[in-house]
Every structure is written in structure tokens, then in C-alpha cells.
Image (tube, coloured by chain):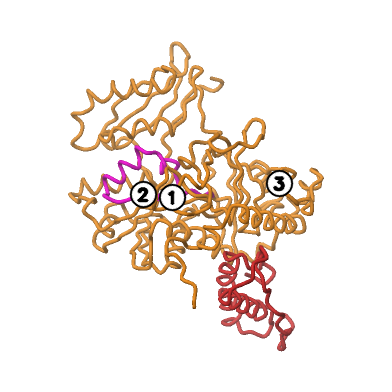
Amino acid sequence: MPQIWPDEYWNPKNETMPRERLRALQLGKLRDLCAWAEARSVFHRERFEKARFSADQLRTWDDIRRIPMMTREEWMASQAERPPYGTLPAANPEVAIRLHTTSGTTGKMPLRAMDSMRDWEWISECWAYGFHAMGVRSRDTVFIAFSYAQFIGFWGAHYANEKLGAMVIPSGSLPTEQRIKLVIENGATVLCATPTYVLRLAEVGRQMGIDVAGSRVERIILSGEPSGSVPAVRRQIESAWNARCGDTAGMTEIGTIFMFECRQQPGGAHILEDHFIEEVIDPETGRPCGYGEKGERVCTSFGRGILPLIRYRSCDIVEKRPHTDCPCGRTFDIYHGGIQTRVDDMHKIRGTNVYPRAVEAIVREHGEIDEFQLVLHTHEASGRDEVTVRCEMKKGQEAAWPALYPALQKELAESHENLRFNVELAAAGELPRFELKAKRLVDKRRKGS
Amino acid sequence: MSAPTPTPAPAPAPASTDRLGTPVTPAEAEILRIYGDLKRLCERGDLPPCAARNARKALACIHVAANDLDLVYEHLYDLGV
């Protein structure tokens, strides 16, 4: 009699695999990946030799620590020395069918990432785990609010939904108003975008006289920003659209997502542990962190063998929790609260650490605020660092400002060791809007401060 | 111009267990057989472009299924996939 698989899982064999078997699977793949990288990638071979590491040393789980960790800086340096791709590629670039780059907007050199035909099938496969886990099926109509350009982001989501058999509506460079019309007129049941842009769609819809809560959208798959796991942001999105959210996270360096939220919404996202090894370490000492301890995620990807990513320091701060925190039956562990912040996203203002995501979590508790900006600057007379939160109110909500701003100022101070935040009202339409990764931090501090 | 290989090597017997040593199911055995067949097809040098490229596309897809089910873990770049 043919086996009947539960509909809950995309890959029931692995998603419900006992942990010890999952570890054995990961260790076997890691050994093969390291052997491949050692044989085919000059970048890895040189680093392995320097660390006196060889793939055949991987016998137990603890042996993973023998593998040297790699950084984005090393990858960039390799590209700079041997342009355009550096020494990381483990195969002839001619096999690639597409090239994507990172934006390089933070002053860093863009990373060039290429993928073969098989790599693209794998990229969409990882997304398929996530969409399936949130209940997306072939009967769905999926609207992807994404500009389909160099940012690799939602390309994989598009192909995953085609693989699932859903009907995908791409939206390319269409303006927001037209996108809303497409969602409504075509009865989209799933929306996929960044958290910022999902809120933007709702607000523009409201201004157009369209109540998106009355649309057919039932599920919203978020990616591209850490705020997809911020409770206040999620509450606003779910309320505005009358739909359920599922967070995901990925990065250009792997080309796809490494975690996804399931329908149980356990307050975090399951790690795709049959395709990745995700370690969490103390960013200062490299000591492994246990469950419930915040640390930097270190990623090993079993896909995209053309650019082997082995023990890659991501700079993302996460907190791993056991799979048993979620009742869905998956044995994949969870990143509680998604990507909580970044190692390089901490800003010291008069001795106090300010994290943009923490500020966003507080600002988004106020549903009357449409958009905001975090400005760091130097006080002209005193020369001391200042932090200002500029807020733009939703149309029709302006009257709430006089009561809102002292409350917001108090909340921000209380959550930042009583650091004084300036809170200012911005004019309607003054602050920038974002489709992809929102850039709300503006650092105008004088150099050396 | 690559040398044609009109007669592919005989098909080796597919593995009877997955990567963790569990016996494969009949469905998994079928996936493995198709995977092996497509690999051999892609190794041929006598396919016209329409067959050579579509065979690679098919191999990429079946590889993902076989990898998901822990039946294989390997890279196919040398086959142009």
C-alpha cells in the first residue's frame, strides 16, 4: 500500500527526523562538502592548509570546530585580488546561469554570487519548505511585491511558488497603487514582500479607499528585514490585512532562506537543518552558545557548491531554541525572534547601545505612525552625540501626535538606560519609503565621535 | 567539438540504502534509477541542443528531490548542471 505522507510538511522524511539522525546526516554532508571544497576551491584549500584541517578529520560533531571560520571580508579580499570572482569558486563560472550581487551600499564591495541550473532548483526548494509550512498550496494565488533585479531576495520565492503549483503574480517595477489593484482584482491569497512594504501597501490602499483587510489575502510571507519577527510589526501587518504572517530570512551569500516560520507561529522560525548547519557563537570569543543564549550565527550551506560557504560568520545575532518549543512536529530547531539584530548594527550614543530594530519595536507599538527615521547626529555647541526619532503620522491620525510624542520619548528612554531621545514630527510624505530593505538609520555624526 | 558517446556505459545498480543506511522505499528506488539515467544521458556527447539542455534541466530537478530524500549528495557542475 502506498505511503500516505502528512500534508503539513514539504519534506516529511527530514522535517520530522529524530535529532540524532539529523546530526548524522549533517555530519556526513559536511564531510563531503569539505572534501569538495578542499579539492576544488583554492580559497578553502589555502585556509584549510593554514589551519591544518582536512575533511577526513571530521569524525564527530565536535570536530566541526577544527574547520576555520570564514568572513565576508575574506571573500571580498579574494574578489579584489582575483577579480571578478576571487578564488572561492569550486567550479568553472561558465556553468552558472545567473549572477547576482549584493548592493554594496554600506561602503563594502559588492559580493558577486553566481548559480548554476541545479543551484537555482535548490534555492527555490528551500523557499518551498517555507511556503508549504505556512500553508501555501497549488490552489493559491501568490502576489510577489518585488522588483526582480540584482537583489536575489524574492527570486527564489517566485520559483518556489511555481514549483508548488501556485499561480504567481509578479509585479516588477509597478508602482504601489497598481500593485494593490493587482492584489485585489486577481484575488491574491498570499502576499510576499518585506514587512515595511507590506505595511506601505496597506497604507496606500487606505489612501486609495481600499480596505485591504477585506481582500482575499490570507497569508503574508515576510523576508528581507529582521522586523518580520518583531511582535508589534507583525500585529500591525496582521491587523491591517486580516491575514497571518510567516517570517523567513536568507542572505545573498547563500542565495536563499535558511529559516522559515510554520503555521503554529512559535515566536520564531525553524532552521532548515537538512540543508544548513547553523551554529551560534559568542562573537567576541567564538565560544559556542547554548539554547536561549544570544550569539552570532555561523552558517554552513550544503547547497550552492560553486561557492562553498563553510562556517561563514554572518554578523546576525540570534537565539536558538529547541524544536520542542513548537508543537508542529518538526525537529528543526528554532531561531526565537528571528534575526534579532546584527553585530555591526549597534550604535553607541553617550555610552548607551542603540539598536535600530529595538527602536523599531517601540515605534511600531504606535499604530498611528506611518513611517519613521532614526537620525544620529552631533550637537553643534556641545559636540555630544544625539539621537532623534523622526515620525510621520498616518493620514487622518495627525491629531494623536501631541499625546503620542511624550509617551514615545518616555518609552524609548526607559528601554535605553534613560538615554534622552529627541522625537520630532516629520511632514507628510517627507520620509523615504522602501520596497526592499528599509534604511531608516541616518548617521550624521561628526567623524571621530 | 566533443567526441560523441553513442553507447553509454551500462547502468550501475542503484544504491539500496539512503545516506543514513536506511533501506530505500520503492518510490525512492525509482527516483534513484531516474537520477542515474538522467546523469548518463547528460554525459552523452551526441544529443542535439534541445535534448542536451532539457536533460540538464530535468537532472537539476530530480537531483533536488534525491538530495531532499538523502539519497544523494553531490555536485553536478562538471555535467553543466
Residue plotted at (59% across, 61% down) = A115
Which mark is in front, 1 or 2? 1
C-beta proximity under 8 Å, tags 1 and 2: no
Queried whether the magenta region covers residue B34, the answer comes back as no
Q: Colour of chain A?
A: orange
Circle 1: element type: loop
In the image, taking residue A201 as reference, residue A5 lies left or right, namely: right
Please indicate, yes or no, whether residue B4 appears anywhere in the rendered image: no
Q: Which residue is mark 3?
A: A64
Of labels 2 and 3, earlier in sequence is: 3
- Give the CA separation, mark 2 to mark 3: 35 Å
Q: Colour of chain B?
A: red
Q: Which mark is residue A245?
A: 2
Queried whether the magenta region covers residue A245, the answer comes back as yes
Within 10 Å of the Cα at label 3, are there few (<14), some (14-19), or many (20+) other Cα atoms? Answer: some
Q: Which residues are magenta?
A: A222-251
- Image location (x, y in percent) of residue A340: 48, 37
Which mark is in front, 3 or 1? 1
Marks 1 and 2: same chain? yes
Of labels 1 and 2, earlier in sequence is: 2
Query: Could you tell me which chain the residue with mark 3 belongs to?
Result: A
Q: Which residue is mark 1?
A: A327
- Give the CA separation, mark 1 to mark 2: 17 Å
Marks 2 and 3: same chain? yes
Q: Residue furthest front?
A: A1
Marks 3 and 1: same chain? yes
Residue plotted at (45% across, 50% down) = A248
Residue A394 in the image: above or below residue B52: above
Q: Amino acid at mark 3?
A: Ile
Residue plotted at (68% across, 46% down) = A80
Q: Identify the image quadrant of residue A133.
A: bottom left
